[in-house]
Image (cartoon, rainbow, N blue to C red):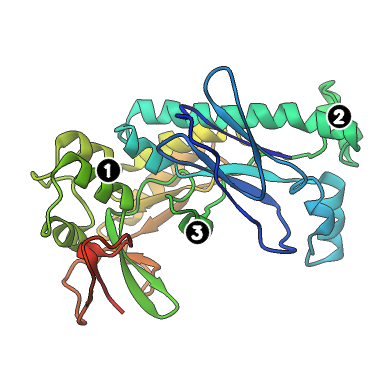
């Protein structure tokens, strides 16, 4: 059983999408949307807590997944069955923060991320003993640290993780994991094609706040940023910061705040500009080691010739496909490169 929690629900239903047939599930990811709505993989039922949060139950999907999934080797298969490790996590943090007008690099953002991770962990900790009572504890429970501490039997040795969610966040239509937005507009390389995408929350905000224009989106697409654009209100500029605009120290404050509530590792990338030096990378790794997360990734923009996400920079070289301004897709200025 998986639990996912999002504060501040405004009474909208929890929307779900069916899981692919026979797909083994090791992780269940919940998306935190601006409205406080939780969307999870698999059929769910939702319960509203007294504090206004929504708890989404994913019954039956994770409990038997370890036994149904195919594992590469016999040793790995045995280890998986004896510990039954799963990873309940979430994605969409950056979109939630932007909708609340909370800058990603602010103390409020760090506190909110920690609270979300803490709620998910607490719900999982309550559910695992119940599941162990219904069926049984994981086979190695008797020799685990949980037994040494006098804790009740648990169904799974590991309950929570924050995965990269790079692909499933695209399917869910939100930002990945606990990462900041890569850019407000960017080019995504997909199967040999390059698609220009604009963050839909930003475009919706621009229209609602009245600063949208036919020229704004193409201009934003050339830089991927609105930080210095005077046409965009200051609170929106601060809320829609990007990964490269986020200082390494801010990246490293966010990760430990979530990690302290998570059993496995927290996927997190510190994005650096192309001008970053070897010393910059060294200092980030040392700072991460002192902060205590289980791992950290550093990526210098442009260090790989074929990176998946890039900022357009120059105008599109090929003739774009023009579409109507009512188009609901994510192409910059409603012009899609093909």
| Residue 47 image-quadrant placement | top right
Return the residue nearer the eye: 58 or 165. 58
Residue 174: in sight, yes or no? Answer: yes
Element assignment for label 3: helix
* Local crowd size for mark 3, using a 10 Å CA cut-off: few (<14), some (14–19), many (≥20): few
First-in-chain label (2 vs 3): 2
Mark 2 and mark 1: span between their CA atoms? 44 Å
Q: Mark 2 = which residue?
A: 153
Q: In the picture, which quadrant includes the C terminus?
A: bottom left
| Horizontal side of residue 114 vs 192, given as left or right | right
Quadrant for the N terminus, please. Answer: top right
Q: Which residue is mark 1?
A: 240
Mark 3 or mark 1, which is nearer to you?
3
The image shows residue 51 at horizontal and vertical percentages of: 54, 18
Q: CA distance from mark 2 to mark 3?
A: 36 Å
Question: Which of the two marks, 2 or 3, is nearer to us in this view?
Answer: 3
Residue at figure coordinates x 48%, y 35% from the top left: 12
Of pointers 3 and 1, the one earlier in the residue sequence: 3
Indicate whether 260 appears above or below 58. above
| Residue located beneath label 3 in the image | 171
Residue 147: percent from the left, percent from the top?
A: 86, 27
């Amino acid at each position: 059983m998986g639990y996912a929690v999002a504060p501040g629900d405004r009474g909208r239903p929890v929307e779900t999408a069916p899981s692919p047939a026979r797909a083994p599930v090791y992780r269940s990811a919940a998306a935190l949307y601006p409205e406080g709505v939780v969307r999870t993989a698999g059929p769910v039922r939702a319960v509203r807590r007294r504090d206004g949060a929504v708890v989404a139950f994913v019954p039956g999907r994770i409990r038997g997944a370890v036994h149904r999934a195919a594992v590469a080797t016999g040793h790995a298969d045995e280890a998986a069955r004896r510990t039954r490790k799963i990873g309940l996590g979430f994605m969409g943090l950056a979109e939630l923060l932007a909708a609340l007008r909370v800058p990603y690099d602010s103390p409020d953002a760090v506190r909110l991320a920690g609270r979300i991770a803490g709620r998910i962990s607490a719900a999982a900790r309550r559910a695992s003993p119940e599941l162990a009572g219904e069926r049984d504890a994981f086979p190695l429970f008797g020799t685990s640290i949980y037994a040494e501490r006098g804790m009740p039997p648990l169904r799974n040795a590991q309950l929570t993780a924050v995965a990269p969610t790079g692909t499933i966040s695209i399917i869910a239509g939100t930002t990945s994991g606990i990462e900041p937005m890569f850019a407000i507009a960017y080019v995504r390389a997909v199967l040999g094609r390059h698609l220009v995408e604009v963050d839909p929350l930003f475009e919706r905000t621009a229209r609602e706040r009245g600063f949208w224009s036919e020229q704004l989106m193409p201009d934003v697409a050339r830089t991927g940023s609105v930080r210095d654009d005077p046409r965009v209100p200051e609170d929106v500029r601060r809320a829609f910061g990007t990964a490269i605009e986020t200082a390494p120290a801010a990246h490293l404050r966010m990760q430990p705040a979530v990690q302290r509530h998570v059993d496995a590792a927290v996927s997190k990338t510190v994005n650096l500009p192309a001008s970053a030096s070897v010393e910059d990378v060294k200092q980030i790794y040392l700072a991460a080691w002192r902060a205590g997360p289980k791992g950290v990734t550093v990526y210098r923009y442009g260090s790989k010739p074929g990176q998946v996400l890039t900022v357009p920079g120059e105008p599109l070289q090929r003739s774009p496909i023009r579409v109507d301004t009512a188009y609901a897709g994510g192409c910059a200025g409603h012009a899609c490169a093909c």
